[in-house]
Amino acid sequence: MRKKAVGIVLAALCYSIALAGVFYFVGYKAAYDHIEASASTLTPQTFYATITDIRDHTFAVTGMEVNDINFRGKFTCSIVEETKITWRYTDISINDLDVGDHISITFTGEVLESDPAQIRHVDVIQLLDDEV
């Protein structure tokens, strides 16, 4: 009888350990999937800048003083076909932008910490000046 009780306790212990292991790995997988999903849906950020140079489809800008400290420096950004360029809610072309124009830049993704910093994916550029 005593051997049977010990066997039942050992079986219950093994079952509990196996069940705990399954729940651990299921929880780990769920947490990992959540982290991966949140990393792929990046939040857009916007800052204000003055255009200092235009070369082909690459802009050099300097962040304005109204920005957070992280966006007051010098940046370069490439304009691609998907980048929307607007002025007063009207689409304009890249040729309507000039050195000295004040713009807002909305982007997603990383900013490469170089000198100047490089913005990889610009979503929207909005011209802030009164005239095109």
Image (tube, grey):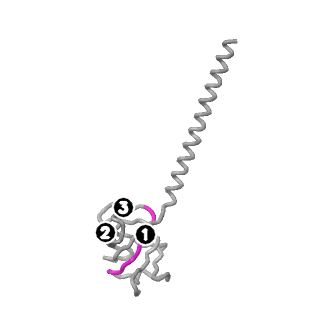
Query: Alpha carbon of mark 1 to alpha carbon of mark 3: how far?
Result: 16 Å
- Earlier in the chain: of badge 3 and badge 2, it is 2
When asked about the image quadrant of residue 79, the answer is bottom left
Instruction: Tell me the residue that label 2 is attached to.
Output: 74
Query: Alpha carbon of mark 2 to alpha carbon of mark 1: how far?
Result: 15 Å
Front one among 131 and 69: 69
In the image, is residue 30 part of the stretch drawn in magenta? Answer: no
User: For the point 66% across and 18% down, which residue is it?
Assistant: 7
**What is the crowding at mark 3: few (fewer than 14 residues within 10 Å), some, or many (at least 20)?**
few
- The answer to whether 8 is drawn above or below residue 113 in the figure is above
Q: Which residues are magenta?
A: 99-109
* Residue type at numbered disc 3: Leu
When asked about the image quadrant of residue 24, the answer is top right
Instruction: Tell me the residue that label 3 is attached to.
Output: 112
**What is the crowding at mark 2: few (fewer than 14 residues within 10 Å), some, or many (at least 20)?**
some
* Residue type at numbered disc 1: Thr
Where is residue 78? Give x, y as percent.
40, 71
Instruction: Tell me the residue that label 1 is attached to.
Output: 46
**What is the crowding at mark 1: few (fewer than 14 residues within 10 Å), some, or many (at least 20)?**
some
User: Under tag 2, what secondary structure?
Assistant: strand
Magenta residues: mostly which secondary structure? strand
